[in-house]
Amino acid sequence: MATPENAEIMVVADKVTCLFDVSAPLLNRLIERQPRRTLRAVDGVSFEVKRGTTVSLVGESGCGKSTMARLLVGLHRPTSGEIRFPGEGGRPRVQMIFQDPYASLNPRWRVRDIIAEPIRTLNLRSGEDATRDRVDELLVLVGLSPRDGEKYPHEFSGGQRQRISIARALATEAEFLVCDEPTSALDVSVQAQILNLMRKLQQELGLTYVFISHNLSVVRHMSDRVAVMYLGRIVEEGEANAIFANPQHPYTKLLIDTIPNLEDPNRDRKPLGGEVPSPINPPPGCAFNPRCGLATDRCWKERPELMRQSDGQNVACFVADTRIPFEETVLVSEEV
Amino acid sequence: MMLTASSGHKGLPSMPAVSRTPVLSVRNVGVEFPTRHGLLTATEGVSFDIAPGEILGMVGESGAGKSLTGMSVIGLLEPPGRLSAGEIWLESERIDTLSLRERQRVRGRKIGAIFQDPLTSLHPLFTVGKQLCETIRYHLGLDKKAARARALELLNQVGIPGAEQRIDHYPHQFSGGMRQRVVIALALAAGPSLIIADEPTTALDVSVQAQITALLKQLCRENGTAILLVTHDMGVIAETADRVAVMYAGRVVEIGPALDVIQRPRHPYTQGLMNSIPSLKIRAEALNQIDGSMPRLDSMPQGCAFHPRCSFAGPRCAKQRPPLAAVGENMSAACWLHQGGVNGDA
Ligand SMILES: Nc1ncnc2c1ncn2[C@@H]1O[C@H](COP(=O)(O)OP(=O)(O)OP(=O)(O)O)[C@@H](O)[C@H]1O
Ligand SMILES: Nc1ncnc2c1ncn2[C@@H]1O[C@H](COP(=O)(O)OP(=O)(O)O)[C@@H](O)[C@H]1O
Ligand code: SF4
Ligand code: SF4
Ligand SMILES: [Mg+2]
Ligand SMILES: [Mg+2]
């Protein structure tokens, strides 16, 4: 139930796990005597997003960011754990924005109809005139003109198409947007336009974002909080400023160290070796141990849990100073 | 591994292009497409040199003409695209006028190509060893055994662990980063003096990206290979390129030492581009953005192609196109601000 304490919270992920069956076809398994195999795409992930703020998920490819995004919008069901929307009125309208705006826009429809579709389906305006006005309003809101509504998606550049998909998402009156690499296919100059638009819309409409990007300077620009994922788990979570200024987990440090600093680039960089291990056969203990310079014997035997640090950051690493288990401090429990 | 004619200055930092004969010299090259509605000019007046052991970065937004420039050098322009003007010289040999067969020889032997998607360069049905050996035998005329030995050496050189086993694996059995290493090995097979790398790390994770760019730098230093590195990632340019060329609407608008272009750009477009990159240090309220978008080929404005978006534009900019001209010692920019002002007459 909502209380003043948690009314501020848009969404809670509570020990969410998502497994995929990646076994070979039955016949092959029988012939080759292979066991069933499962892949832990998301493994016991907990975090919460306050209304009107942005939480970013970062990490290397395959670490589970998109799966987490799909869980949040309900495109996947958690194998265990749950996604809760503690606010009054239950589940809010949630929309997803994808990397490739082209793939998500029907090429045979005029932009006007693409944006009007959710308004009609959800009966958000009565009558065609009101719908039309709303579409014009949305086009202007995202920096296009009402005349653009008459065109087809292929007549627009990548950045403009992303504006169209944002307009369509807002047409549902969504309050919560999950954006999966929304600017990764765009040039830096176009990216700046879209990021500015997203920040402006957030301020004007009080939107809540979960933002996914592999570009850490983009994440720095967009986020209030950041969750760093590695092999399906959150290894560090905290306020964006703190994570970037003072990363605690060795993996977060590695990620932040690999970003070139344009003011003072490191032209003699020694690349850090290693790749992400397979999520089908993760290494025992801390999954980061094969690449970690600080690993001890304990890291091969036990798995570190996300613990709240004295400075408020949450870190899953034995070497970092651990204090209070994360779940006991931050999560809003059902009974409150 | 001394296969290239130009190798011989191991480990030396690259020197300014003027001091040695360039490996590649692109002179005033343009690419056009005949269409039903007339001739479309995609690139025009593109000129640059790359010295042995030098990495020239090429940046610019999507559609600016980076890949077409790379493709013209490799000789793989897709028809009906064709060169409209200019000359391309590779180690003192003019290559844009060669016959198809001759170009094919030059392509594998002297120019190696690396593209964004490693799978476009690899055949899915052959092991990487077989593909490497074929290339080596075709270009270097080695026998089977020697070719395999060379293939192994290449796989080791590009940092594939357990090369002895992995040489007999198929492309799909490698991760994205490892596959790109195989493509680099393939590009290096004949010991080329020039490598064209078009967005070689765009599809890869940051950590793997750093590994691949380090590998390219090492090859460049150790073998004296010249590299044209096309990317939209300024970070990669800052850490990898010696010089950088900025393209806008089919032309080179600025060229100079990488750090100068990144930190003290002279052309208003480059300045806008640099300012639109979010900073890691401070969280600005809004990013600097260049409003509008790059003009399309069929609606190029007169004068400076950037003038509709440029906050410095003056009357001259809408009438006359600024040529690429020296600004200071090592830099060139195509902008009237540095060539007598934007108010001059037409
Ligand atoms: N087959 C073609 N017919 C007509 N125009 C073409 C053709 N191929 C490319 N172009 C045009 O030439 C220009 C330059 O294309 P090019 O592929 O070199 O751009 P780019 O800088 O590599 O862009 P990207 O980063 O998106 O790959 C673009 O305007 C493009 O639309
Ligand atoms: N439908 C699926 N079936 C099997 N495996 C999947 C499926 N979707 C995702 N995965 C696997 O889950 C892991 C996380 O995927 P994803 O969330 O897409 O990663 P990313 O961080 O790149 O977005 C990867 O190893 C991926 O291969
Ligand atoms: S728990 Fe051990 S292996 Fe894992 S990040 Fe910390 S020190 Fe490294
Ligand atoms: S020539 Fe004029 S319009 Fe073009 S970049 Fe320079 S100032 Fe701007
Ligand atoms: Mg993804
Ligand atoms: Mg390209």
Image (cartoon, rainbow, N blue to C red):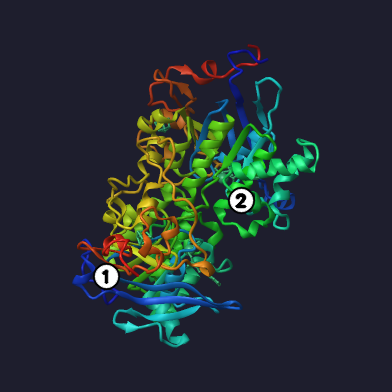
Q: Secondary structure at mark 2?
A: loop
Residue A102 position by quadrant: bottom right
Going 60% across and 46% down the picture, which residue do you hit?
A: A98
Q: Nearer the viewer, residue B142 or A117?
A: A117
Question: How far apart are the alpha carbons under marks 2 and 1?
Answer: 41 Å
Marked residue chain, label 2: A
Percent coordinates x, y for residue B119 in the rendering: 53, 63
Going 40% across and 36% down the picture, which residue do you hit?
A: B284
Three-letter code, disc 1: Ala
Viewport quadrant of the C terminus of chain A: top right
Percent coordinates x, y for residue B173 in the rendering: 54, 57
Going 56% across and 19% down the picture, which residue do you hit?
A: A331
Q: Residue furthest top?
A: A336
Residue carrying label 1 = B51
Residue B70 position by quadrant: bottom left
How many other residues sit within 10 Å of disc 2, few (<14), some (14-19) or many (≥20)?
many
Ligand 1 within 8 Å, label 1 CB: no
Residue carrying label 2 = A101
